[in-house]
Image (spheres, rainbow, N blue to C red):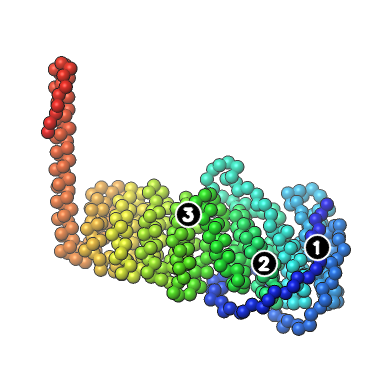
Amino acid sequence: MFKKIMKGGHKKPSKSESNEPSSYNLGGSNVVVSHASRGQLVPSPVTTATPPPPPPITSVSPLPLFRDVPVSDRQALFLRKLQNCCFQFDFADASSKNAAREKEIKRQTLLELVDFVQSGSSKIVSESCQEEMIKMVSLNLFRCLPPASHENTGQEPADPEEEEPYLEPSWPHLQLVYELLLRYVVSTDTDTKVAKRYIDHSFVLKLLDLFDSEDPREREYLKTILHRIYGKFMVHRPFIRKAINNIFYRFIYETERHSGIGELLEILGSIINGFALPMKEEHKLFLVRVLIPLHKPKPIAIYHQQLSYCIVQFVEKDYKLADTVIRGLLRYWPVTNCTKENLFLGELEEVLEATQPVEFQRCMVPLFQQIARCLNSSHFQVAERALFLWNNEHIVGLIAQNRSVILPIIYPALEKNIQSHWNQAIHGLTANIKKMFMEMDPELFEECQRQYEEKQAKSKEVEEQRQFTWRRLAEAAAERDGVGGGEDYMITS
């Protein structure tokens, strides 16, 4: 038996709100829709009475088009069409011809509803009709997502670029429901004061739960819709940020599995772009407690591009955060994952491009100790990516200003590459950097070379002494075994 969710009654209007100016940047997100935009109609001051709820219907049946009924009957027809769209179908079962016909009727009805809302005709829709529309949207969208492919096998989630994405079987209907919701949210005829009663905190939380869908088409719609809700419903903004943070916390510290981290970071990239200066403490805490720890999970490659964009946005808005970001990267720097290390080096270059000399000086010692380790990596791509930092003019300028500190740190790594690295390309790049330092400050270069040679000589001396001690131990052991008296001998150096 099909479900029926029609409810009657009116809701009292809420108190008026102040129209707070928005500082949120919506320019970065384009809405991709499957219908052409219509001209905006001026809302009519005349209000029409809400029709009584239609009688229950027992099957999905064709209904007249909106243009074929008088304007006074369109609200009643709108409700009947919503009721038609409340029926759920099993898309895994394609055996019934009857079901296929009803699915097509529902799809056509959804198309009509989208066109009706998009065309500006929705201005005649009463508040209770809007409530029923959100109920219909909720009934179709908010569902239990199927288990991810890796959940039954216990395997690590695969790179989405390397495998075929999961496609939701009911997408022909879901897409149109998402389209209807999107058109309703962005419509100039939608009164925010009315809509926020139905697009409330509970509705937003359920939307966020759907970001774990494995279907990339669904996540793309969710990203656009949540983006627009954040821009239009200013009252929801703190709640949305907090709810997204909670998803990130669970991902970082509990599951390390979530399909929509990249899309959520894309939304946050636009939000960060709209932050006013001076930046609030809440936003700085978000950087320290959420964005930087997002470098820890193993599947960072899936969302690193979006994460890197958010991080760089913070540094570009407030250059004093560069030291915090660089030290955060060093704290989560990978030890054995070369692919991840390459990503970190790329992000580090972007951050250093936005770093000012004062902030650079605060973190340059631990930073170049790590870069020196990367220069000597046996994985040639890591060593090569680290050497490419010297191709960036801004970074070379920062290094040149602080060469007296930096060169003594990395000189041993450069010499080690020249003497023993297996890759010839690394030899050539390293020789170029040595030449750059030599031309930059010949005296400093010679001093570092002298110190390196002294240290090597001393190390050789220590090694020879160690070998000599081991030989004496071996001789003493052999002598004791030769005597065979079972006596204990003490060996002194």
Against 149, residue 282 (above or below) is below
Residue bearing the label numbered 3: 300
Residues under labels 3 and 1: Cα distance?
Answer: 45 Å
Crowding around mark 1 (Cα neighbors within 10 Å: few <14, some 14 to 19, many 20+) is some
Eye-nearest disc, 3 or 2 = 2
Amino acid marked by disc 1:
Met
Query: Would residue 362 appear left or right of 165 to someone viewing this image?
Result: left
Q: Secondary structure at mark 2?
A: loop
Which residue is located at x 39 percent, y 67 percent? 321
Which quadrant of the structure image shows residue 14? bottom right
Residue 265 pos. (x, y %): 52, 62
Contact, CB < 8 Å: mark 3 with mark 1? no
Q: Quadrant of the C terminus?
A: top left
Q: Position of residue 307 (x, y in %)?
A: 47, 61
Q: Residue at x 29, y 55 (%)?
A: 369
Label 1 secondary element = loop
Instruction: Work out whether mark 2 precedes mark 1 in sequence or the reverse, and give the earlier one.
Output: 1
Label located before the other in sequence (3 or 2):
2
Q: Secondary structure at mark 3?
A: helix
> For mark 2, what is the residue?
199
Q: Residues within 10 Å of mark 2 (few under 14, many from 20)?
A: some
x and y, in percent, of residue 278 in the image: 44, 74
Task: Point out residue 455 in the picture as x, y percentages from the top left corner.
Answer: 17, 50
Tell me the residue that label 1 is attached to.
Answer: 6
